[in-house]
Amino acid sequence: MNDSHIVCAADGGMGNKYEKKDYKSALRTRCAERTRAMQLVCMCASILVPTFHRTFVSGMTWGTSMKKQISAIWHKLISYISKEQCFLIFLYQAFTVYLENMRTRLQWQTGIGGESGGIEDLMQLSKLFQGISEYELKKSVDDFEESIVWKAIAEDYVCEAIVRELKDILKGFLQNCEDLERVITILEELALELDGLQFTPESVNRMFAAIPVNEGTASIAEQYCGLAGTGLAVYDKLSAEGSKVNLTCEEQRRLYCDISRIRMFCHGIEDPKVLCHDILKARREEGLSGEPEAGYDLVIADLPKGKNRSAFVDNHEKMYREWLSIQRILDRVGDKGKAIILVTKGALVRQMEKEIRESLTEADWLEAVITIPANMYASTHLGFELLVINKWKPPEYRGKVFMADISSLEHSKTAGNGISWEAVRDLQRAYTDFEDWDLFSAIVSLEEIRNKEFSWNPFLYLRFRNSEGSRKTVELGEIAEIMRGAQITKEEEKIYAEQATHYWLNIRNMEEGNISFEESSMIRAKSPDWERKFGIQEDDIIMTSKGSVLKMCIVTPDMPKAFLCGNLTRIRVDQRKYSPYVLYEFLNSKEGRNVLNSIQSGTTIKVFNNTNLSRLPVPDYENPGELQQQLKRIYQEYRMSVKEAESRFETKRKKLLSNLQ
């Protein structure tokens, strides 16, 4: 790697520009001197690759062949330039080759076509748009072209040969718009995340497109559009069904706006409309340029991940950015419009936004909530929820809400971490017909949502829809008392550490199903009711109230007196109704952990609140009491055997070490 490549890798990020307006002329001079050498270097890429492509595809599926070859070129190219620049170059060449293949849609200029053998052969996109009259589109093409580090590519024969090889391979693949989208999907899988840009998985885009829209929908907007993939998925589906729709995309980062315009043009949108502004700061009543006065018929958004900090609204009301975004989106929805938004679980259950959820529920705007699988995004293992808010629900949907959970379905292997075609098809059927499907979907009344204090978590409603043969459940609050630990300040901890009588337990004391008691962390009761409210006793289940990892244990007879801090929650089972050890086994099982994860709020720091815990559905067994003593006994035997084994190990270890000379 020469010096120019080192500079490129360090500084060639998204949007980096080299020598702006005079860079093309400089490259022409440089390339004229070395055209003959480049022709020799690139001979294999320009002549043999297409032949290899035709032979290769005949023995493999089209998609597998394309993915394998693109991936191979990607991994070669990132040795020379940054991942961000690699992504831009791949996109640039994909757009160029596609539009060259679709040249009948463009007004070609004289002199275009034919290859000189130099870097200019790889810089054809702006020439393709010379005959286009739309100023914003042409400017986006020019700015996109200038964002690529052509100087660094031109200064290295091998790097340029790799880019030329890429273009030649794409010529054999890109025959229609679907092929272009397949290539972009492969690039998104290779790039994962770039400069804060988080790609919406292709299967999630399909799910957005599967949601029914209101009759007469003509205007669509995608907020936080990134590269406009979700908006185009919805646009293409509606267009294929014969609807005449207009798509507007909104994004804050200018380079992504440029790429979105080009991508929209490739989908047949002759005058692509992309608004570049901060969506959180812009309000509809302020008269945003380019937005319809009456609002959009459909607004879709995959909200930014990992940026859900709380903020003050109008200098007084504190709200998470997620709900601030939802409110801004609803501002843009017309009086008879609909919004489809991908949100975190916390948006459905956080107490801070309970009043907003109540208001939307009582207005009968909430149409659907759908839980999607976890591990869909590169930056997080969390699952997300598709939230549908409709200001003009059809008569057959009014007074009801469609709740669904497709997170636990078996998805086809070809879907990877995505959602299978079968799941999307079943979801569309159940949603369109507003049907109850056992443990898949439920039609919930507004009264049921009121009874659950306006929680929108589908899990709470689906688990209680028991068809014949399904296991019965009971709410945790009916069989146990749930109490969160004491909340005191650091200064109070120091005061009450004097004349301490109890251990003071925190998350760090929870270790692999057991509790460690630290002499350095003790406290006395702040008030007489602390023992009843925050003390522990035999058979209590202790679990973390907040934290990145869920920890849990059960109190044994030999444990000393202790108080729980606010990061821990105590579940004290009424043993006349249920068995503590049976409950502990369930909560610690894979199914139980999934149940608990489904009611947590927060992204990095997970939080349980007592209201959600009390409504947690647990199996209503017929004979839990019969197993209580047996389970308790085998746990005691296990702990005793572990203690004895540790003692024997320590004795033998010391004896062996004593023989050292």
Image (cartoon, rainbow, N blue to C red):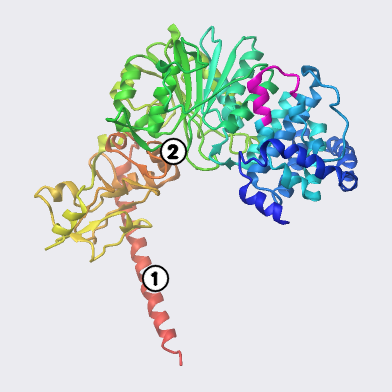
Q: Position of residue 352 (x, y in %)?
A: 30, 32
Position of residue 205 in the picture relative to residue 402 (left or right):
right
Residue 72 at least partly seen: no
Position of residue 299 in the picture relative to residue 499 (left or right):
right
> With respect to residue 288, does 602 lie above or below?
below
Along the line of sight, the residue nearer the viewer: 159 or 353: 159
The kind of residue tagged 2 is Lys
Q: Which residue is mark 1?
A: 645
Q: What span is in magenta?
A: 129-142
Q: Residue at x 31, y 45 (%)?
A: 545
Q: Earlier in the sequence, mark 1 or mark 2?
A: 2
Q: Residues within 10 Å of mark 1 (few under 14, many from 20)?
A: few
Closer to viewer: mark 1 or mark 2: 2
Q: Residue at x 53, y 19 (%)?
A: 221
Position of residue 275 in the picture relative to residue 264 (left or right):
left
Q: Position of residue 551 (x, y in %)?
A: 36, 51
Label 2 residue SS: loop
Residue 636 at least partly seen: yes
Residue 307, disc: 2
Q: Residues within 10 Å of mark 2 (few under 14, many from 20)?
A: few
Q: Residue furthest bottom?
A: 661
